[in-house]
Image (spheres, rainbow, N blue to C red):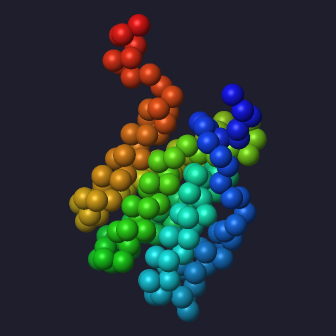
Amino acid sequence: MSDSPRLGMGPVAGAGEVDYEKLIGLFTASYSSELYERHAGVVDRVCRVNSNGFAIRELPYIDRILTFLIVKIVEGKADLFTQPLCKLLRVLALPFIRRTATDEFKMFNNISQVCLTVSKAFDPKVPAECQIAAAKMLAEFACAHGARPSCVDEHDE
């Protein structure tokens, strides 16, 4: 088994390729807060750059992006933000990347906050497609990304 810095298996995502402060600024600045197509494109880029999963240290930024997307969908912009939200949830369903051996313990609040925010995707105004993606993300997280044996596996032994 290799010394992978992931919670689970697989290669490390490209760290530091996204300036999250600027990205959040794009969502909130008065001159760019209504450039919705650009927001959707930026979320797509974040998902491509982090196609192997998000670093635990980046989760507070991802939480803010997730909150932004859910709020915009609830406000009636589902046509623009449904696909970006689903993509973000699919990447969140991957194992989180840790930079140090203790990241998941030191930054447990980051993980729990993202899970709480994902639960907001079950709002009735959020399209079913996003709700399904949110349910799959939480299910993957709950089963430790396939590392926890299921009840059937335990009884077979």
Q: In which quarter of the image is the C terminus?
A: top left
Q: Which of 3 and 31 is in front in this view?
A: 3
Which residue is rendered at x = 51% and y = 28% of the image? 147
Q: For the view shown, which residue lies furthest in the bottom direction?
A: 31
Which residue is rendered at x = 59% and y = 36% of the image? 8
Which quarter of the picture shows residue 24? bottom right
Q: Relative to 30, does residue 139 appear above or below in the rendering?
A: above
The reply to whether residue 152 is in sight is yes
Which residue is rendered at x = 33% and y = 59% of the image? 130
Q: Relative to 31, does residue 98 appear above or below in the rendering?
A: above
Drawn side of residue 29 relative to residue 1, left or right? left
Which quarter of the picture shows residue 85? bottom left
Q: Position of residue 68 (x, y in %)?
A: 46, 69
Q: Relative to 99, does residue 79 appear above or below in the rendering?
A: below
Q: Where is residue 93 in the image (x, y as percent from the top left)?
A: 47, 48
The reply to whether residue 71 is in sight is no
Which residue is rendered at x = 68% and y = 71% of the image? 19
Q: Which of 122 and 49 is in front in this view?
A: 49
Q: Position of residue 155 (x, y in %)?
A: 35, 10
Drawn side of residue 146 relative to residue 99, left or right? left
